[in-house]
Each structure stands twice: as C-alpha cells, then as structure tokens.
Image (tube, rainbow, N blue to C red):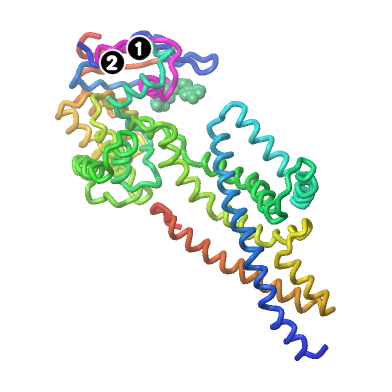
Amino acid sequence: MALLEIKDLHKSFKETEVLSGVSLSIERGEVMSIQGPSGSGKTTLLRCMNFLEKSDAGTMIFDGEEYELAGIGKAQIARIRRRTGFVFQNYNLFANKTALDNVALGLYSARRIPKKEAREKAMEQLKHVGMEGFAASYPAQLSGGQQQRVAIARALACEPELIYFDEPTSALDPDLTAEVLEVMRRLAGEGMTMIVVTHETAFAKEVSTKAIYMEKGKIKETKGEKL
Amino acid sequence: MTGQAVWELVTGSFPKILEYGLKVTLPLAVIAFILSTLIAVGVAMLQYAKVPVAGPLCRFYIWIIRGTPLLVQLMVSFYGLPLLGIHIHPFIVAVAVFSINEGAYSAETMRAAMEAVPAGQLEAGYCVGMSYMQNMHHIILPQAFRTAFPSLFNALISMVKDTSLASAITVVEMFTRTKQIAGQSYNYLPLYLEVALIYLLFCTVLSFVQRGGEKLLGSYGVRK
Ligand SMILES: Nc1ncnc2c1ncn2[C@@H]1O[C@H](COP(=O)(O)OP(=O)(O)OP(=O)(O)O)[C@@H](O)[C@H]1O
Ligand SMILES: [Mg+2]
C-alpha cells in the first residue's frame, strides 16, 4: 500500500490554473524527484500537499486514510503534518532561536516534550546532519548550507514518515550544495521517504526511485515504478 | 535678585520639584507606557490575524486616537466621564488617556514589526506542528518585540515630557508644581530651566535603560 497517494489535485490562483489534475503516489522508503521548468507548479504542488496552500479539488490518501483536499479540516491537517516534514528552498529557520532550539522548538512547544529531553533529541539530530558544533549559533551566524542542514535536522526531529524538499540547494553555492546533498543522500540510504523538487539532475537520477517531470501544472512524464 | 538668591531658590525648590517628578510624572508615564504596550500587543494581534469585526474595530480606534489631539482627549475624558456617572481621580483619568493614546501609536509599531517577520518562519512553524498561538508566542511576538523595542521606548521618553499636559485636568505633576513655586517667587526662568534639567535627567536615565534592555533582548547573532 502506498504511504501517500494524490488523486486529481487542482489549484488555481485567481483565474490562473496552476495545477490541473495532478496524481501521484509514493511507497514507504521511496525517493521521488520532481523536475520541470520554472513556473510549472512544483512548489505549489508541495505546498498543497502540506496544506500551506488550499487545494481547490483532489483527494489525498495518507497511510490508508482518505481526505478530500478542498474541505479538509484543521485537526486533520494537524494530524497529517505531525507525520510529515518540510524543507524550504530558503531554509526559513526561526531567526530568534539558536540552531539547537530551531530543532527542539517543535518538540517542546507542539509536542509538549520536556525542554531538556527535547534539546537532547535535537542535539542527536544536529549530529545527524553534522551541525552539533553549531548548536548555540543563531541562523544569522550560519552559512546557507549550514542553515539548510539545521532545517533538515528540524524536519527530522519530529520523526516524520515523509519529508518534502522544495529545491533545498538552489539557493546555495556548489560546495554548499554538496554538503546538503550528502545529508539527503544519507537519509535516502537510511530508508527515509522523500519527495524532492530539484534541479540537480545527477542527484535526482542517483537517489530517486521515481522521477516525475512537470509542465504547465501537469505531470508530463513519470519514470520508475508504475503510478 | 542676586545670584545668591537665585541659587538658593533653585536649590531650595529642587527637592520639591523632584518629589513631584518621582511621585507623579514618572509613575504616570511608566504605568501608562506598560498599559499602552499591552493594548498595542492586543490590537496588533487582532489586526495581524485579520479577525473579523475586531480587526476593523481596531482600525477605527487607531483612526480616532491618531486623528485628535492628546490635550483634547484629556479634556473630553475629564469632563465627559462625570456625565456618564463615572467619578475617578484625575490621575487615573490621565493614566487611562495616556495609555489609550499611546496604545494606538504603539499598536501600529507592533503590527509593522509583526509583519516584518518573514511569513516563511510562520509556515515552518506550522510544518513542525505548531499552532497559530504557539507560533505567536515563540516566533512572531519575540521577534516583533525586539524590532519594536527602540520605537516603543522612544514613545515612553516622549510620554515623560507629555505628562505635563495632565496639568490641564488638574493633575499636579512636576511641571505644574514648578509653575506654582515660580508663581510664589515671581522668578520664572531659573525654575523652568531647573525643571527642564530634571526632565533631561529622567530621559537620560531612560536612554540608558533602553540600551540595557536592547542588550538584554539580544540581537540573535545579527551584527549591528
Ligand atoms: N501565491 C501565489 N499567487 C499567485 N500566483 C502564484 C502564487 N504562487 C505561485 N503562483 C504562480 O503559480 C505558478 C507556479 O508557481 P510555482 O512556484 O509552483 O512554480 P515552480 O515550478 O515551483 O517554479 P520554480 O522552478 O521557479 O520554483 C507560477 O505561474 C506562479 O506565478
Ligand atoms: Mg519552486
């Protein structure tokens, strides 16, 4: 059974239809890459799947539970979000929190894990991405690559079953890109389920089990296993 | 009047003037500042969240307050409240009017500071499972407060001086007290210069408090 399945997702901004019937599915442990020209709707698709944008129509089946995307409620959104992570193109770290607290905050505020325990867990995740030496640094004191690794640790801390990545390296220099891709490669190796929008064609070929190519709000081509 | 006599007048009146500064002027400004900040945070949050009805009501409040002089607001409250059967001490009226007045300005400062926090951080908060209020508490308000702090403190410093307007509604504060003493001695200028120096002293101390506050709040590693 697929971990996540999307059926016929539609999304318009005002009059313009940006996603015109997108369907996809991903099994546990799979890595799906999404590529396509600028403006084809890749970011919008990820944002709709994590409810940062409201879809106009479509169905989501997450771990066997079916949801109507257009009418989904707050509680259901919260339930699904607790099981997914999101990594943004521009990191979006909390500027007023240290690297450690960026990772720990979701644990001690949303999940009500005691602060001390949350920070211990957060430290584990920082180690996982090689950022334990920067636990006390604020985002403004970190390089882009370092910020993105903290952002990945933040997503990992909530023990998600699926992580969305929206062009996690496209704001980075080549050498910083390499350090972030290295972390993602390791995650893929550990069996993390990931949906990755990326322009890194070589990386996409190397790690993805399924590759999607989007154009004008539609999936034009799917490589890999059956859809 | 000889220099000697002027000097005696100034030094003799100093404790009397300072007393009213510490007993009336400063408490009026500080209490009103604290209340105005609370009003500002509430009003800014209602607007930031675009709460129906309450949001537009906040705009209306800001519109009225910013569009009328503080002195007129003091007068209207002072003469209006008794007509409504509300009889309270003029000092309390002054505290209320200063709070409500400053609250409207500070609400705009706070709202702008909240909107300056990148929306992406709020989205990141949602993505790790935080609720709107948890985002407010941990992400938006702390950053907004840090951004707004110098402007808010600026308002406090202005307010210390504006408290002299409270004399219009019979509150005897530092400036009114100075006027009384000056009237008895028929020697105005030295006393007004003296009270000017005391205001300056108060504001200087507050400037240091502001610096300290800014240090305490930190700058999240952003080099200034
Ligand atoms: N909030 C919005 N309001 C209006 N239009 C939007 C909004 N967000 C995206 N769009 C439009 O939707 C279309 C798809 O945008 P999207 O960001 O999903 O593309 P993308 O495939 O991620 O592109 P890129 O590779 O440049 O990141 C674009 O035409 C864009 O202008
Ligand atoms: Mg995009």
Instruction: Using the image as rendered, state which of residue B125 and residue B11 is in the foreground.
Output: B11
Amino acid marked by disc 2: Phe
- Give residue B33's position: percent from left, percent from top: 60, 54
Instruction: Look at mark 1 in the image and give the residue it sits on.
Output: A67
Identify residue type, mark 1.
Tyr
Q: Is residue A96 left or right of residue B56?
A: left
Q: Secondary structure at mark 1?
A: strand
Could you tell me which quadrant the N terminus of chain A lies in?
top left
**What is the magenta range?**
A39-67
User: Which image quadrant is residue B14 in?
Assistant: bottom right
**SS class, disc 2:** strand
Circles 1, 2 touching at the beta carbon (< 8 Å): yes
Callout 1: CB less than 8 Å from ligand 1: no
Measured along the vertical axis of the image, is residue A57 above or below residue A91?
above
| Badge 1 density bin: few <14, some 14–19, many ≥20, Cα 10 Å | some
Would you say A153 lies left or right of B42 here?
A: left
Quadrant observed for ligand 2 in the rendered image: top left
Q: Residue at x 58, y 34 (%)?
A: B47
Of all residues, the one furthest to the left in this rendering is A190
For image coordinates 61% across by 31% down, the residue present is: B54
Query: Is residue B77 or residue B63 the one in the foreground?
Result: B77
State whether residue A49 is above or below residue B131.
above
| Image point (73%, 58%), residue name | B166
Question: Of B34 and A214, which appears nearest the observer?
Answer: B34
Quarter containing the C terminus of chain A: top left
Q: Which x, y percent locates residue A12?
A: 48, 15
The numbered mark, 1 or 2, whose residue comes first in the sequence reads 2
Image vertical order of residue A193 relative to residue A112, above or below: above
Residue at horizontal 29%, vertical 40%?
A103
Cβ of mark 2 under 8 Å from ligand 1: the answer is: no
The residues bearing labels 1 and 2 have C-alpha atoms spaced at a distance of 8 Å
